[in-house]
Image (cartoon, rainbow, N blue to C red):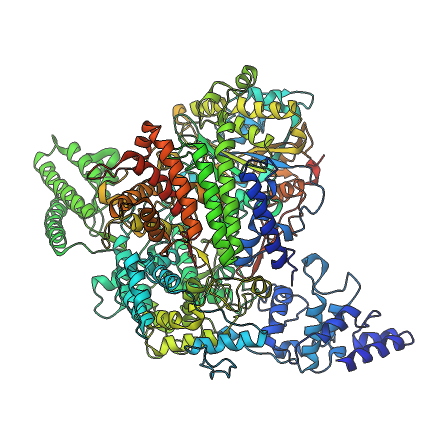
């Protein structure tokens, strides 16, 4: 049987009393002591986990080895960016433009029902212009001018492949390792395993944005940042674009922070009386949670206050940075959260599903996201944060090198979902900068060199955080589950 | 055992002189001396090693993955899950894995003790290990004869005799004898009975989901009759709030929501089924009937509309209506969901593993999974469609609306027949061919001839309009007839959208064939299979057609070992914070063993014998001395049993968030106490739905009474559930486990959400009107929230705060106005503003007391 390294109940009991004393002091305004341990879900969880019988962070012995990355910012591009128009340059497409995609590639492959029944599948050339950039000579399309400028900091993987042809299952697969909802998301796994290093913010934060014209209907399901079968405290906390950034963050109208402080002091004293009688350690856990809530009421608005940001930084993220809930705003927030030690920031941006609007919408989509993504890299780098922050940029699959629609109907050109090969980039902690890893065939249809499966990608992310993905399991319904199911190999070729 | 250790040691000194051939024969390597830690662990083992309690958990967890039931995953041709195989010579190696009575001849022992990392079992790459204690258990078990037993959960339960206990005065019913016996064997004492105000509060939440009124508390405290407690229990069991409280738990199991989920997330009408559940609990419908109706109500002889409505249980799953979806994939996905939901809810079998391969741990083969699949594969659902209501449906509207729709349908059919007849003349084609095959129509209608693919009755408004417009000038009389049909169609569709069409189960007239699907892929069909139940469980009842109804009856048959146990266990969890089997969702070999197997079996059998009487089961549980204990915990108890597995005390539990909201509404007096009906939309921060749906769906907050209904009636959008609930099942898949972890977000909700602040405001008003003196007011408010009178020091803390708040608000009238203006509720007559504001803040304080949000 696995040994649980949680505190012995008696020690825990003693610790509670100490913790209570600590609060007693803080209440009197003495302490600006680090609340870190109290806010660390691992430590906070000790008691409540005991009642569910699962291991707390304290018992997991993580990380397994020294991590290269202390935190992750995942810029998830919902809808599937077209790899052949953005990063995976294929001159062959121009040569074959208008001709049917070779049967040996497409025959028998699954596509969505939108082109599954389409009789004509003409190849179409990239709709952008490619050029090589930086010392590394990375190919980047002119739709992504700012990303091109930081190409030497990025590691492109051009041989990604996945399994589902539909959005929701494919996104769920990327983020949870399974196509069906119900498993913990990557951020939940990591915060469960590694705890928090932020003193007054949640360990796992998620933000969403979409293209301005809402051209695509992909929904952000909350299981994209869910905790699955892990305790719900490990689920991502959604920072909202409008209203309170965190639900119910603001004190009620007609009250103020001082009043709240007083009320919390009273609550603590009254709960303490009950604790003396009942001795239930949960009572003290609750006090700690109310305290963290109080801290968050201060720290979150501070975070969303952009007035301290110099103009040149704001400019770098682009004009949208002033619009709450935009991708640019979320990228800047991600940097601020990283600075504060938040372990996993998941920014999801929808709008990459160009089935019928490739020719005008893809460019707009890139304009919304290109500068903010590049700015985030530059901003982290100049602050020395890129060394231990892993940034990931990519969608759930790629798009077909052939056309969806009628080739004569230029206005409504599109590309369908393409899980067989696609590209993403990573940057920062532990990842080789300025390299391209893996390759697709001449049509950008299948991987031909160093294929990277989603589970390989997940294994690599875990590795960078100091976790051996095969050893990091949670027993549920009689089975030991992992983020990577029973698969996945660390992609050693991209490690610095 | 020591004998064995000596043998091994002797063997060890001998083996230096022995030949390799001999080594191979006895199958023990060079380092076969029993390691010290294993020898030491052996000394601490119980006298008799029990297969189910000691051995199987080890074999299952560390060995079955490669040496278990799954034939395809089996390594070295070795299986350890059945005795015959494990004790037979393996042809390839000549080894005998287990020689009963002879550990040193058992290859298994050699391999688990082996020091060579290449040879030790479990192998290095499995990342699994055996502890010294576990090795010792296996060795001692083999020494004692290596007896296998059937997995406990598959043996039909029986009532054990009540054990002898030392403390004769404590037990109140059968549960207590077993619990006490265990406690006495551990040297623990049960706790004293909880105070009356604690008991009534605990019972009220457990049975009705609401706190008691102060009057009810007082009445119970004053009741000197010997059966005062029982009278209270009976009163609460017969409350109509009982059904609302217990329906919630079943709605989580049934993954109930008011929308389909996925893109667009269209609204469906499933709430009549929710009301059916509430009524079933209130009427104390026997659980076997509850089961049969929900799984196969449509197949009952002379099934009523209500019987069919019950089968909505199996249509509560999400439905993917995304563009680009493959309908058959969606359909198959939904059947998986039904199979697995029924597996979890009634049998606590983790069937989903067998979707892709034979179960690694439990004896459920992939073929058996698809045999179960076949039962649920026979409905007319096609996977097509993107609206909220996906056929098959049952119309449960009031009689008047049923008549209306029938009349409209009759009229629609008449006109449609007329159109069909006219078209036969107008657009000649071969018999049985649709009009679109007519040359005439291909000429006349041009590119949209496929509008005529369907018979007139099956044409939608859109198509009919196109036909009408096309023929208006060319053929006015025909066009007018089409227009008449279109109007009839519009009228029919409009009425239909007003009727209560609930998604339910039906049975195809002709069987849809079922195949094993390789890796669960909808299109990778393999061998054909037919409905059937797993071999490890009892056979189907005789003399019945082998359909869903047979499956339902089988689940509640007397010799089914799981249903009653699983149900009792799930309910036990609600009363004690954890199940007797902690893994509520898994009664398989990888699940936890029961902490009190005799209690579980006694209650399971009693439940069946009582005619599956749920209220009788609950009464039995709450009448026990075990349940009535105080939840106070001492350091000693915490050390001895931190999880309260052995029940030497009651369990304190934070109330689930839905109950917290109900409580706030109830004690403020805001709660609108009406039963059932359409879901309502209480307070929710702005923009929540818009954010999740790209602005396409806006939350239209309800008004007046709709804001104050019990949380059960809150509209549940599947992609973004009600925001005030911070700990609930997400209603995506069947969930049976209580989720009660705490985060700071909980505190933010109960401190700042308008729901709670408004409740505090109205609680303040209630308090101010009820009492004149501040000290009485504080007591009154405290008692409403906690069901007990406050202590001196508690009152003194509150008094100090009240004085300060009054001072603050008297100096800041604007602020006082703001806090008393939270929410839609306005008092009938005005109150003193300062008092109202100060008591509102105090109201929020008492609503957030740990004691208020906890059931002690």
x then y, percent, for residue B201: 36, 60
Residue at the far right: name it: B17
x then y, percent, for residue B164: 51, 84
Can you say whether B528 is above or below A162 in the image? below
x then y, percent, for residue A317: 53, 21
Q: Quadrant of the C terminus of chain B?
A: bottom left
- Quadrant location of residue B232? bottom left
Of residue B727 and residue B57, the one placed in the foreground of this image is: B727
Q: How many marks?
A: 0
Of residue A39 and residue B287, the one placed in the foreground of this image is: A39
x then y, percent, for residue B244: 30, 58
- Quadrant location of residue B174? bottom left
Of residue B21 and residue B605, the one placed in the foreground of this image is: B605
Residue B387 visible in the picture: no
Judge left or right: residue A286 versus residue B547.
Answer: right
Residue B564 visible in the picture: yes
Judge left or right: residue B267 versus residue B324.
Answer: left
Judge left or right: residue A25 versus residue B135.
Answer: left
């Amino acid at each position: 049987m696995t040994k649980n390294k949680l505190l012995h109940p008696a020690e825990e009991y003693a610790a509670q009393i100490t913790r209570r004393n600590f609060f007693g002091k803080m209440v009197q305004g003495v302490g600006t002591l680090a609340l870190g341990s109290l806010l660390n879900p691992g430590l906070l969880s000790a008691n409540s986990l005991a009642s569910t019988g699962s291991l707390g962070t304290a018992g997991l012995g993580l990380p397994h080895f020294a991590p290269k990355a202390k935190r992750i910012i995942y810029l998830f591009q919902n809808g599937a960016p077209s790899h052949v128009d953005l990063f995976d340059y294929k001159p062959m497409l121009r040569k074959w433009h208008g001709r049917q995609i070779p049967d040996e590639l497409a025959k028998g492959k699954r596509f969505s029902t939108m082109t599954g029944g389409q009789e004509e599948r003409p190849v179409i050339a990239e709709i952008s212009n490619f050029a090589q950039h930086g010392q590394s000579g990375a190919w980047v399309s002119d739709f992504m001018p700012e990303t091109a400028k930081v190409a030497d900091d990025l590691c492109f993987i051009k041989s990604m492949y996945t399994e589902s042809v539909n959005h929701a299952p494919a996104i769920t697969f990327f983020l949870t390792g399974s196509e069906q909802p119900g498993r913990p998301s990557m951020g939940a796994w990591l915060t469960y395993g590694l705890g928090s290093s932020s003193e007054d913010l949640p360990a796992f934060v998620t933000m969403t944005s979409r293209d301005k014209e809402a051209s695509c209907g992909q929904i952000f399901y909350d299981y994209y940042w869910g905790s699955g079968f892990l305790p719900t405290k490990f689920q991502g906390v959604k920072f909202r674009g409008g209203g309170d950034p965190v639900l119910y963050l603001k004190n009620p109208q007609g009250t103020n922070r001082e009043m709240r402080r007083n009320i919390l002091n009273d609550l603590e004293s009254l709960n303490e009386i009950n604790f003396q009688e009942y001795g239930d350690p949960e009572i003290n856990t609750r006090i700690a949670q109310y305290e963290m809530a109080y801290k968050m009421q201060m720290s979150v608005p501070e975070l969303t206050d952009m007035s301290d940001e110099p103009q040149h930084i704001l400019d770098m993220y682009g004009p949208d940075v002033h619009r709450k809930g935009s991708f640019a705003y979320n990228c800047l927030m991600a940097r601020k959260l990283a600075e504060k030690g938040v372990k996993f920031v998941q920014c999801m941006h929808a709008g990459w599903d160009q089935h019928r609007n490739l020719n005008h919408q893809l460019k707009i989509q890139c304009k919304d996201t290109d500068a903010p993504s590049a700015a985030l890299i530059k901003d982290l780098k100049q602050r020395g944060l890129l060394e231990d922050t892993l940034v990931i940029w990519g969608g759930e699959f790629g798009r077909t090198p052939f056309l969806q629609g009628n080739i004569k109907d230029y206005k409504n050109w599109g590309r369908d979902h393409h899980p067989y090969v696609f590209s993403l980039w990573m940057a920062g902690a532990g990842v080789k900068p300025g390299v391209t890893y893996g390759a697709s065939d001449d049509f950008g249809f299948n991987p031909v060199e160093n294929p990277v499966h989603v589970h390989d990608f997940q294994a690599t992310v875990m590795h960078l955080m100091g976790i051996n993905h095969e050893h990091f399991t949670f027993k549920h319904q009689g089975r030991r589950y992992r983020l990577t199911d029973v698969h996945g190999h660390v992609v050693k070729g991209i490690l610095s | 055992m020591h004998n064995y250790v000596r043998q091994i040691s002797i063997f060890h000194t001998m083996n230096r002189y022995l030949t390799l051939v001999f080594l191979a024969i006895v199958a023990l390597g060079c380092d076969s001396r029993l390691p010290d830690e294993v020898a030491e662990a052996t000394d601490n083992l119980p006298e008799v090693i029990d297969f189910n309690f000691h051995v199987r958990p080890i074999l299952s967890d560390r060995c079955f993955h490669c040496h278990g039931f799954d034939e395809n995953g089996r390594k070295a041709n070795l299986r350890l899950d059945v005795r015959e195989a494990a004790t037979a010579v393996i042809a390839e190696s000549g080894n005998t894995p287990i020689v009963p009575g002879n550990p040193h001849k058992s290859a298994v022992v050699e391999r688990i003790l082996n020091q060579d990392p290449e040879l030790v079992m479990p192998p290095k790459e499995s990342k699994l290990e055996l502890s010294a204690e576990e090795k010792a258990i296996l060795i001692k078990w083999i020494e004692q004869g290596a007896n296998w037993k059937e997995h406990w959960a598959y043996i039909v339960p029986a009532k054990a005799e009540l054990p002898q206990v030392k403390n004769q005065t404590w037990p109140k019913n059968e549960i207590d004898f077993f619990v006490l016996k265990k406690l006495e064997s551990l040297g623990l004492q049960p706790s004293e009975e909880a105070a009356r105000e604690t008991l009534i509060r605990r019972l009220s939440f457990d049975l009705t989901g609401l706190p008691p009124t102060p009057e009810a508390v007082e009445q119970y405290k004053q009741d000197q009759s010997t059966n005062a407690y029982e009278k209270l229990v009976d009163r609460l069991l017969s409350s109509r709030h009982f059904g609302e409280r217990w329906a919630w738990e079943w709605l989580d199991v049934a993954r109930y929501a008011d929308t389909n989920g996925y893109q667009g997330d269209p609204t469906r009408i499933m709430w009549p089924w929710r009301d059916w559940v509430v009524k079933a609990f209130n009427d104390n419908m026997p659980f076997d009937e509850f089961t049969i109706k929900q799984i196969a109500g449509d197949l009952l002889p002379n099934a009523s509309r209500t019987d069919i409505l019950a089968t909505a249980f199996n249509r509560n799953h999400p439905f993917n209506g995304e563009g680009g979806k493959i309908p058959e994939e969606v359909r198959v996905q939904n059947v998986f969901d039904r199979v697995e939901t029924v597996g979890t809810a009634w049998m606590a079998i983790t069937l989903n593993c067998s979707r892709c391969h034979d179960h690694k741990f439990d004896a459920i083969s992939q073929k058996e999974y698809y045999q179960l699949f076949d039962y649920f594969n026979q409905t007319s659902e096609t996977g097509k469609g993107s609206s909220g209501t996906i056929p098959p449906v049952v119309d449960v509207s009031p009689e008047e609306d049923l008549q209306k729709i029938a009349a409209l349908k009759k009229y629609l059919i008449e006109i449609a027949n007329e159109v069909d007849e006219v078209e036969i003349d107008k657009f000649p084609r071969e018999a049985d061919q649709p009009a679109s095959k007519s040359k005439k129509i291909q000429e006349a209608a041009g590119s949209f001839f496929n509008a005529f693919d369907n018979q007139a009755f099956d044409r939608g408004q859109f198509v009919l309009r196109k036909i009408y417009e096309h023929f208006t000038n060319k053929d006015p009389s025909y066009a007018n007839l089409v227009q008449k049909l279109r109007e009839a169609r519009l009228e029919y569709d409009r009425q239909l959208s007003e009727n209560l069409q609930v998604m339910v189960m039906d049975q195809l007239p002709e069987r849809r064939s079922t195949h094993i699907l390789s890796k669960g892929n909808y299109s990778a069909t393999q061998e054909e299979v037919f409905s059937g139940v797993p071999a490890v469980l009892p056979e189907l009842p005789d003399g019945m057609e082998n359909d869903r109804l047979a499956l339902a009856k089988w689940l509640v048959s007397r010799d089914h070992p799981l249903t009653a146990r699983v149900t009792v266990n799930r309910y036990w969890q609600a009363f004690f914070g954890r199940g007797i089997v902690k893994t509520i969702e898994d009664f398989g070999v990888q699940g936890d063993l029961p902490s009190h197997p005799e209690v579980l079996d006694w209650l399971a059998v009693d439940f069946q014998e009582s005619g599956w009487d749920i209220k009788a089961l609950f009464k039995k549980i709450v009448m026990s001395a075990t349940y009535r204990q105080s939840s106070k915990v001492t350091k000693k108890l915490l050390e001895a049993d931190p999880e309260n597995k052995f029940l030497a005390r009651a369990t304190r539990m934070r109330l689930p968030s839905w109950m917290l909201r109900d409580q706030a509404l109830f004690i403020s007096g805001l709660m609108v106490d009406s039963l059932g009906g359409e879901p309502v939309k209480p307070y929710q921060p702005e923009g929540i739905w818009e954010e999740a749906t790209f602005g396409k769906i806006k939350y239209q907050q309800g008004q007046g009474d709709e804001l104050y209904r019990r949380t059960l009636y809150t509209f549940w959008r599947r992609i973004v559930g009600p925001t005030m609930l911070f700990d609930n099942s997400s209603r995506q898949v069947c969930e049976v486990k209580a989720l009660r972890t705490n985060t700071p977000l909980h505190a933010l909700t109960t401190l700042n959400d308008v729901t709670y602040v408004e409740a505090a405001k109205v609680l303040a008003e209630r308090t101010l009107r009820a009492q004149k003196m501040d000290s009485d007011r504080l007591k009154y408010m405290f008692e409403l929230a906690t069901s007990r009178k406050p202590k001196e020091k508690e009152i003194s803390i509150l008094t100090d705060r009240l004085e300060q708040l009054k001072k603050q608000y008297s100096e800041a009238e604007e602020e006082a106005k703001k806090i008393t203006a939270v929410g839609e509720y306005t008092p009938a007559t005005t109150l003193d503003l300062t008092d109202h504001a100060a008591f509102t803040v105090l109201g929020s304080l008492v609503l957030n007391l740990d004691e208020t949000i906890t059931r002690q």
